[in-house]
Every structure is written in structure tokens, then in C-alpha cells.
């Protein structure tokens, strides 16, 4: 099985509204020997205001943002072609489930392309951050990490691997591969375990087969191990496995009435721990949790008895499922108003119909000027909106004035907003520049760069103030 190591550089931290500026990917064999690499950078899209924090990380200048030979879609389409050509593979990113994977999915969705190309057709998602944390817990000497002020290991990629060109997409993919090689060599059992939970189906198969296992959870700056037994799946969020923490004797809870059981399930430390089967969580042999003070005084025979007691009490499982459903329904009722998602945020609101999928395929085969006729034919209004925005970003010259004006007005409303938004606005960007100036009053080079950003923003403001 081949592996793919993937990283992105972006205009900000929003997976729905920010833009991929650079992609770097490396293909290796199953021994982590490089076979091929690919990277590309694109221009910033119309209507996108970058976040200054992201620019500080990437080091991108205004020239970098505006003068690439490639448009955003040219880069996205090239990435799609490379990933399809590389075929079946395990894809790894660093903290990918929280950023890179949803970012790429939403990017493809906004381009009216199949969104899930990194975890379908033989590809599965892995996360090197999960792997390196687990390796450090199992074998502290497997990888050297900086230590935080609170005495916890720090797992930021640029701190683990000092590399030239830090935070370039390809450079970070190279660093990620270097980290993977270290784990592969020094904590191979962890590496092999990580390959068992790269998909929802794989994870479900594993946790159903193993009566008890070591679950790893990261919170408060530390990775903690728990000895658990998969007991049930959440009645609403079906990718969530609810695992019984075996430090607790279930017989102490069987006879609780409904309200007391509900209260017990809400208290901390948790009786039930959530394992998200679609997030490549690392599952280890149960023995890795037995050194923990909460479990090392419990005999294996007693642990097996607790599992048997749980599995023989289906009525208790049904009661817990009912409570989980009630908690979900109560949370929904407490929402004062339904979240008003923008079209860019609605990837997970439902799959396109077969008709709309066929229309998207046709859309990309038509000449730019002929795509205008397809905009109003989508059954789902999301795709009509995205089609207009997409053509505006790539070929605004072919749009009729009515659509051109509508799209520019929508962008103007967003970028001039004075509210706290999910995207970066012009007022926010100007404030970021002013704050950064005050911190770098004696740094001539930094002030010059900030002046360039300011002029860039003013140019956008002039273009849209009459929209």
C-alpha cells in the first residue's frame, strides 16, 4: 500500500471561507521510501481577505498572493489529477481531521467537484499528529519533543523537525514524512496500530472485535490512556462509539433510576468515553492502559466480568441510548435560533442528487461561456450559488452583468461587515495591521511588509466600495 503525505498553506483558519494558497504532497511506498512529489501555488481569489496571522506563518508577501502563474482552480484541478493518478493509498496529514481534510473537501465542493477524493476509491485518512502523540506515550524516547511551561510535550510540527522553508506546504509534507519515519523505526507497533483505524468501517471492526482496548484522548495539553469496552453507538451521531471506562463497575449503575443514571453519565470523570470512528483515533492493545493507577489494581478476571455484565444487560444499553437521545433533543431545544449556514458551509448538509452530480460533471466539460446556461438548472440552490461564485473567481468576463453585480454585492457585504464573522473582513484586517505595526515600530522590514498588505487591502476596498 502506498502512502501520501499532504499539507496546505492557506489565507486563514476557516475551512469554509478561507482559501488554499499552496498544496504539497509526497507519494511513498509502504516502507516510506519516496516515489514522487508534487506542489503548486495559486493566486488569491477575488473577494478573499487574508488573515494576517496566517500570512505571518506562511511568510507570503503581496507578490506571492497575487502573481502566481496559476489560478486557484488550476491548482485544485491539478491536485485532483495527481491524487487520482496516484490511486489507492493511505493519506496522512498533520492534524488533518481538524483542518486539512475538511478544508480540501470544502474547496472541492465549492469548485463543484467530488469532495471526498482523499478518503474514497481506495484512499483512507490518517493523522500523523495522532500517531506521534501515541508513540510518545508508549515510548517516550521514540521522538524528542520540546516541553511546555506546564511540563507537557509540545507536538507542533515545526518544533519537532527543524527544517528549511518551514511552513511551506511541500516542506511541511517532507517534515511530516521525516516524523513518520522516526515512528516507523522506533515505535513500529504504534505505526502498525494506526493503520487499523484509517476509516470508520476499519475502526468499527476493530473495536467490536476487541473486548477491551486502550483508548487515547488528548485534553488539557496531555495525552491520556483509558481502558475501555465499546458498548454502543450514539443514536444520532452514528460515528461516535460510546465506550465504557472499565475503572467503573457497571453493577454500581444498573439499578439507578432514570434521572440518577442521567446525572451519573454527565459527571466527570466520565463513565462513557466517546471514540469518533471517522477520525483515525489510535486504538492500542489493552495492556498499554494497565500501568495506569486507575486500572493496575483491577484483575483481568474482574475486567472480563465487568464486560460480561455489560453485554448481558441489553436493557441498560437501551436506557443509556434513550438518555443520549434525550440529551441531544434538549440541546436542540436550547438553541435560540437555528444556525444560519452560508452556502460555503453546507457541504455536510446533504449529498447532491444524481441529477446535480451529472450537471456538475457536464459543467466542467462545457466552455466557460456555455456554463452560464447551467447555473439555474441545479435542483439544489447551493450549487447554483457556488456555480456563480466559481465562474466569477475564474472567468468574470463571461458573466452577464446581472450575475456579476449580484456576486460583487455579496462579496462587498461580507468584506465590509463590522461584525465578528466567520471570514476575515477588511476592518478586521486593517486592525490586525495596526496592531502588528505597534508591536514592530523599530522593525523597518516588517513595517514595509505591513505597508504592502495595507495597500493591497485598500486596492480591494476601492474595487468593491461601489459594488
Image (tube, rainbow, N blue to C red):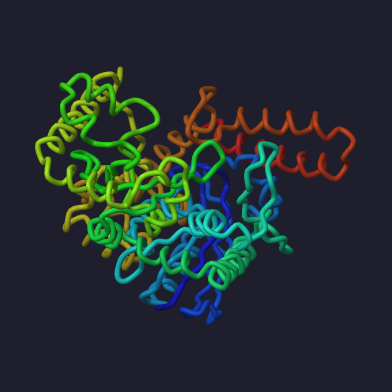
Is residue 200 visible to us here?
yes
124 lies left or right of 361: right
Quarter that holds the N terminus: bottom left
Q: Quadrant of residue 41?
A: bottom right
Give x and y (percent) for residue 171.
64, 65
Give 284 or 80, whichever is nearer the viewer.
284
Please tell me which residue lies in front, 417 or 37.
Answer: 37
Q: Which residue does the image show at 58% across and 64% down from the upper left? A: 176
> Where residue 183 sits: x, y (%)?
55, 67
Q: Nearer the viewer, residue 140 or 148?
A: 140
User: Which residue occupies 67% across, 48% down?
Assistant: 57
Residue 428 percent location from the top left of the image: 61, 29
Q: Position of residue 387 (x, y in %)?
A: 34, 51
The residue at 12%/40% (across/down) is 313
- Based on the displayed image, in which of its 4 quarters is residue 247 positioned? top left
Q: Point out the residue furthest to the left here.
A: 315
Residue 39 visible, this angle:
no
Amino acid at each position: 500500500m502506498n502512502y501520501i503525505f499532504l499539507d496546505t498553506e492557506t489565507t486563514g483558519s476557516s475551512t469554509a471561507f478561507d482559501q488554499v494558497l499552496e498544496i504539497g504532497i509526497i507519494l511513498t511506498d509502504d516502507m516510506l521510501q519516496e516515489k514522487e512529489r508534487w506542489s503548486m501555488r495559486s493566486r488569491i481569489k477575488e473577494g478573499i481577505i487574508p488573515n494576517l496571522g496566517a500570512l505571518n506563518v506562511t511568510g507570503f508577501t503581496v507578490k506571492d498572493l497575487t502573481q502566481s502563474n496559476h489560478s486557484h482552480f488550476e491548482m485544485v484541478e491539478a491536485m485532483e489529477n495527481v491524487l487520482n493518478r496516484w490511486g489507492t493509498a493511505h493519506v496522512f496529514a498533520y492534524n488533518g481531521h481538524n483542518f486539512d481534510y475538511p478544508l480540501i473537501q470544502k474547496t472541492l465542493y465549492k469548485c463543484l467537484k467530488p469532495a471526498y477524493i482523499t478518503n474514497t476509491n481506495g484512499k483512507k485518512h490518517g493523522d500523523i499528529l495522532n500517531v506521534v502523540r501515541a508513540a510518545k506515550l508508549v515510548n517516550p524516547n521514540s521522538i524528542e519533543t520540546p516541553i511546555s511551561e506546564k511540563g507537557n510535550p509540545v507536538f507542533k510540527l515545526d518544533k519537532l523537525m527543524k527544517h528549511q522553508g518551514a511552513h511551506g506546504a511541500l516542506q511541511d509534507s517532507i517534515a511530516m514524512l521525516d516524523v513518520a519515519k522516526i515512528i516507523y523505526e522506533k515505535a513500529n507497533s504504534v505505526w502498525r496500530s494506526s493503520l487499523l483505524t484509517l476509516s470508520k468501517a476499519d475502526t468499527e471492526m476493530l473495536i467490536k472485535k476487541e473486548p477491551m482496548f486502550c483508548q487515547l484522548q488528548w485534553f488539557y495539553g496531555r495525552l491520556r490512556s483509558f481502558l475501555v469496552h465499546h458498548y454502543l453507538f450514539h443514536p444520532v451521531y452514528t460515528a461516535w462509539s460510546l465506550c465504557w471506562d472499565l475503572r467503573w463497575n457497571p453493577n454500581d449503575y444498573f439499578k439507578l433510576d432514570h434521572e440518577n443514571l442521567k446525572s451519573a453519565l454527565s459527571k466527570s470523570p466520565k463513565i462513557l468515553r466517546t471514540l469518533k470512528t471517522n477520525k483515525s483515533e489510535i486504538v492500542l492493545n489493552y495492556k498499554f492502559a494497565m500501568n495506569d493507577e486507575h486500572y493496575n489494581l483491577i484483575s483481568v478476571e474482574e475486567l472480563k466480568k465487568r464486560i460480561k455484565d455489560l453485554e448481558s444487560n441489553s436493557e441498560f444499553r437501551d436506557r443509556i441510548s434513550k438518555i443520549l437521545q434525550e440529551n441531544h433533543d434538549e440541546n436542540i431545544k436550547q438553541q435560540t435560533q437555528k444556525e444560519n449556514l452560508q452556502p460555503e458551509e453546507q457541504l455536510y448538509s446533504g449529498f447532491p442528487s444524481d441529477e446535480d452530480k451529472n450537471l456538475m460533471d457536464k459543467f466542467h466539460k462545457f466552455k466557460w461561456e456555455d456554463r452560464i446556461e447551467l447555473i439555474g438548472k441545479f435542483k439544489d440552490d447551493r450549487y447554483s450559488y457556488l456555480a456563480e461564485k466559481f465562474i466569477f473567481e475564474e472567468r468574470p468576463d463571461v458573466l452577464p452583468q446581472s450575475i456579476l453585480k449580484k456576486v460583487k454585492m455579496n462579496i462587498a457585504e461580507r468584506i465590509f461587515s463590522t461584525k465578528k464573522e466567520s471570514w476575515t473582513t477588511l476592518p478586521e484586517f486593517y486592525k490586525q495591521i495596526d496592531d502588528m505595526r505597534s508591536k514592530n515600530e523599530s522593525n523597518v522590514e516588517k513595517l514595509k511588509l505591513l505597508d504592502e498588505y495595507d495597500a493591497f487591502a485598500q486596492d480591494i476596498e476601492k474595487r468593491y466600495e461601489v459594488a
